[in-house]
Amino acid sequence: MGLDDQTVRIFVAHGGLLRVRQAWYALPDTHVDAVRACEIGGRLTCASALRFHGELVADDGVLHIEMPANAVSREPECGWGSVRLHWPRHPSTGNRAVVDAEAAWRQWERCVLAGHRGIRSTR
């Protein structure tokens, strides 16, 4: 956005921006699941991205996060039982916060077939 460090600190101090992680900030009305995914080190994918896009998905509410290959995940405040990490070989299409709906549907199908709903993955 082109803001200098002092301006960013002022916005954060007064609630105009949320500090998500180092060098990552969000507007206060940013989707809470997108913020949580970013805090952990990735972006929304699978069922979580589908819910973000307004799709109806039968799932148990676990937060699905796509992690970059070189990422280090941070343990979520609510524990690993509420998070499913996806480590794709290649990043899915979408933006920094969420994969697009088409990629999310593909991931959801693989996730459900693998029986991984709600289980933390490992590399």
Image (cartoon, rainbow, N blue to C red):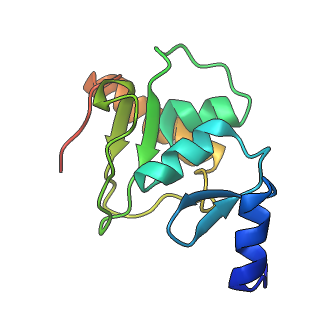
Instruction: Residue 54: name its quadrant.
Output: top right
Residue 99 on image: x %, y % = 58, 51
Residue 62 on image: x %, y % = 44, 24
Instruction: Residue 41: name its quadrant.
Output: bottom left
Kindly identify the residue that appears in the image at 70 percent across and 71 percent down: 9
Quadrant in which the N terminus appears: bottom right
Residue 59 on image: x %, y % = 49, 16
Q: Judge left or right: residue 11 versus residue 40.
A: right
Q: Nearer the viewer, residue 2 or 57?
A: 2
Q: Is residue 61 at least partly visible in the picture?
A: yes
Residue 63 on image: x %, y % = 47, 32
Kindly identify the residue that appears in the image at 48 percent across and 51 percent down: 39
Kindly identify the residue that appears in the image at 18 percent across and 51 percent down: 123
Above or below: residue 25 compared with residue 42: below
Q: For the image shown, how many numbered marks are present on the structure?
A: 0
Q: Nearer the viewer, residue 36 or 46?
A: 36
Above or below: residue 60 compared with residue 85: above
Q: Is residue 43 at least partly visible in the picture?
A: no
Q: Judge left or right: residue 11 versus residue 20.
A: right
Above or below: residue 101 compared with residue 59: below
